[in-house]
Image: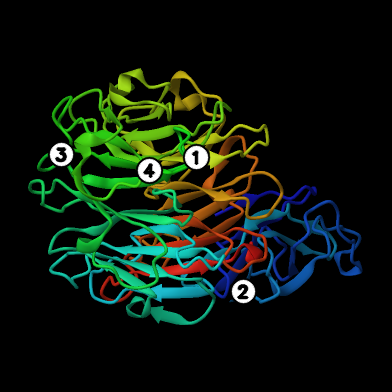
Amino acid sequence: MIWLLATMALALELDVEPVLSGGTLELTASDAPPGETVHFVVGLNGTAGGPCPAFLGGACLDVESPIILGSAAANLAGVATLSGVVPESLSAWELDFQAAHGGSTPAVSTAVHTTLLLSAAQAVGQWSGEGADDWAGRSLASAGDMDANGTPDLLIGALWHDGAGVNAGVVYLVHDPTPGPLRSLSAADARFDAEGGHDAAGQAIAGGGDLNGDGFDDLVIAADAEDSAGFNAGAIYFLYGPVTDDVALADADVKALGEAEFDLAGVSVDLVPDVNGDGTSEAFIGARYHDESFDDAGSAYLVHGTGHTGDWSLSWAHAELLGEAAGDWAGIRVASGGDPDGDGTPDLLVGARYEDTAGVDAGAAYLVSGTTTGTVSLADARAKLLGEEAGDRVSAVATAGDVDGDGLDDLLIGQFHEPGDLAAGAAYLVRGPVSGDLDLATADARIDGVPGDNLGYWVDTAGDVNADGFADILVSAPYDATGGVEAGAARLFLGPISGTVPAASAHATWIGNAGDWTGLIVPIGDVDGDGLDDLAIGMAHAGAADQGAVGLILGADL
């Protein structure tokens, strides 16, 4: 709740409940004279100065071009309440509410600024999982242009789908995703089924890069519990584009195998732009339980895109980045780091959730030169970004793009636990260039969740959704309770940002229904050809039986 005092001599307070599009609007004014009529207004254009209507007896509003929502009489306690459905006229993201009354002692509340919340279930296009407990939308990625028609495609993972066996997993390809009614993923344009039960195919997915240099986009699909190289060693599949029909993962162009049992190779994957000048993208792969340096220290592998074929071991990777200490879980998240130092070569980001430098399980994120080759320790990383305190569990990593417009890419880091704030979580923006050890308490911007949100579980760039020349950022909070217990939320923040930013100040927020575990949100390119980047949002537990669902969000609506 938001409480603000009036600027006039006689205080009038206004309380605004979260405003959900299509939901219930509830405004409460207090400290009004009993029996006085209180008027409630909203503005869509800021608070630079509004009119002074006669019914307010000379008092003036702050909101520009106010829309009168209604009025209510104050009760004996001086409280007036206006309730109803959020009107369709409230179509702007940024809203400013005021309450005012005339009479012998006119008063106007200070304007209360808030943002309109959207239900993730109201996305303009939706796809639902095929079966119970599929968790469709637990992983999402742009597929690039897999049918070579000039429009980006969408890749959707459902890691517990039972089509090829219990919990085998499947990944779906949707060509040219468009607005429309709820559709079953059984009608997806192509599907990639696991080799067998309990593989968890779709645990991590990536697309939009050219691994074999043929000019077509390719896909990377991970099944981190696949057993070919040992129990739960993991496997990562490359599918070379174009792809327009179903492909069983057993028939993939490449199958890269974890080095040893329990490695969970493929727990995270990404495609990195060319780092070695051969014109192809690189595959970046995490294996959180790999034991080469220490027990469960974890590792991350960089595989140069030189047109590999067949089955091979990740021991052949061009670079392996080893966790510093036992139990670090390095590689739980990996991502392209963009180019934060401006040298023209993309760098690499590795999350280590349980790294202990800043305190037990504080976590750390590493920035590593993209030109690294051979087996190296993450202790030799270019930069190490440290959690603020024990238990933070820093691990989510992404390039933010150039958020501040200085020509250098910035970094986005998430920690979802933050025990001192009861799992509120936080996301950090660190501007490039970055080197050495850095306490995330000194980050250029920090986005704060509220207790229980687990904000920062996933982070990503949004591209530039409003085409203003500054990159925008996406932050998830899968346990946000605005829409109910474990409903989850995804938030968009427009660049540039700096300082401490409360989650509630997001430019746009999408909330789930109770139990949906909404939060994963990713950029997918411009699917409708309007020149604006579009987004996809996952609701992994949506549906009565946790089938999962995915929604399409158009940049034009932002």
Reading the image, the residue beneath label 4 is 305
Looking at the image, residue 201 lies above or below residue 455 = below
Type of the residue with mark 2: Val
Q: Position of residue 326 (x, y in %)?
A: 17, 26
Residue type highlighted by circle 1: Thr
User: Would you say 253 lies left or right of 510 here?
Assistant: left
Mark 4 residue type: Gly
Picture coordinates of residue 148, whole percent (x, y): 50, 65
- Disc marking residue 86: 2
Q: Looking at the image, tell me whether mark 1 or mark 2 is earlier in sequence order.
A: 2
Look at mark 1 in the image and give the residue it sits on.
Answer: 399
Q: Secondary structure at mark 4?
A: loop
Quick one: label 4 or label 2, which is nearer the N terminus?
Answer: 2
The CA distance from mark 1 to mark 4 is 20 Å
Q: Which mark is residue 259?
A: 3
Which amino acid is tagged 3? Glu
Q: Position of residue 480 (x, y in %)?
A: 41, 55
Point out the frontmost of discs 4 and 3.
4
What is the secondary structure assignment of the residue under circle 3?
A: loop
Q: Nearer the viewer, residue 74 or 288?
A: 288
Marks 3 & 1, CB-CB < 8 Å contact = no
Q: CA distance from mark 4 to mark 2?
A: 51 Å
CA–CA distance between discs 1 and 2? 36 Å
Measuring 79% from the left and 47% from the top, which residue is drawn there?
9
What residue is rendered at 53% in x and 41% in y? 400
Residue 119 appears in the picture as rendered? no
Foreground of the two, 172 or 391: 172
N-terminal label among 4 and 3? 3
